[in-house]
Amino acid sequence: MTERYDVAVIGGGPAGLSAALNLVRARRRVLLIDSNRPRNSATLLSHGYLTRDGISPLELRKLGRDEFLGYEGAEHRQTIATNVVPVPGGFDLSCEFRGQQSSAVAGVVLVTTGLTETLPDIAQLRAFYGTYVHSCIECDGYDKRDQPLALIGEHSDLVERALLLSQWTDDLIVFTHGSDVVTPKDEAALVARGITVDRRRVASIDGDREGMRGVVLEDGTIVPRAGGFVRPEWSAALDYVARTGADLDDDGLLVVDGHGRTSVPGLYAAGESTAPGPQQLIVAAGDGARVAAVINRDLIGGLEHLADAVQ
């Protein structure tokens, strides 16, 4: 028979783990579905998570799973959700991993699968990504402090990111990779802060096992840089909830109210599945805990229902 759970949490990052832990502590039977293939797996160290600053992302997830699985009612499946279908009293879930299929039924589903990212088509960028080139300025800016840095991107938030990065270095070059996302007015504002703008296309990243040496442009110019940041293309991998009919915004993210409820009763979302751009790990964990509290109250009828019963 198909196993039935009070809550299925899809996604085992900080948001999902935090939600799962709080729900199982509320004596809910919780299924955590996760393939353990996080977006930030290329990053050697995670930062800004209280008491765990500098931990490996994969180690942080392992610690969270172990804490969760220490409670009665907790179950983890290393698999990928492929379909979530509303049924009377909850949802049918289909999963698959390495050719193995499984299913489950849950009264409530919480989506915390986060984002996928696509890097610009630049040779050797992937080789240095997570060590010398990063995407999260708040996470890794401190460790690149006072270094000659590159910021590579083709999106409208490039200027904002450059200004933020200037908090950690006074030697910054913004590479627009041939795009026109930096207006002349923006460039003047950046130059006034000592930030250079280079509009040529980037061909490659120069370096070796000893580290990054520079940014290679299409015309063969090598601009010396010790590290940098890149702005990936972020997208939500939410095809598996399509049959629920849940509302999505213009960015393809789940639309939620102030409590994590989607447009479909019983379907909730937390973390990066609901907000544009990656979140810091500790922010995602907090969001997961917040939505878990809402789910637990909704499952027992909500605070308003309880108040009416007492009266």
Image (cartoon, rainbow, N blue to C red):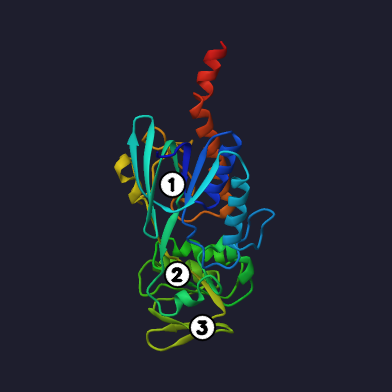
Label 3 and label 2: CA atoms lie apart by 22 Å
Residue 200 lies, in percent from the top left, at 38, 79
Q: Which mark is residue 187?
A: 2
Above-or-below relation of 303 to 127: above
User: Who's the residue at 67% across and 53% down the image?
Assistant: 50
Q: Earlier in the sequence, mark 3 or mark 2?
A: 2
As measured in the structure, the alpha-carbon distance from the residue carrying label 1 to the one carrying label 2 is: 32 Å
Q: SS class of the residue under badge 3?
A: strand
Residue at coordinates 57% horizontally, 13% vertically from top-left? 310
Identified by mark 3, the residue type is: Gly
Please tell me the numbered disc located at residue 274: 1
Pick the residue in front: 229 or 15. Answer: 15
Q: Which mark is residue 120?
A: none
Q: Which mark is residue 214?
A: 3
Amino acid marked by disc 2: Glu
Query: In what quadrant of the picture does the N terminus appear?
Result: top left
Neighbourhood count class around disc 1 (C-alpha, 10 Å): few under 14, some 14–19, many 20 upward: many
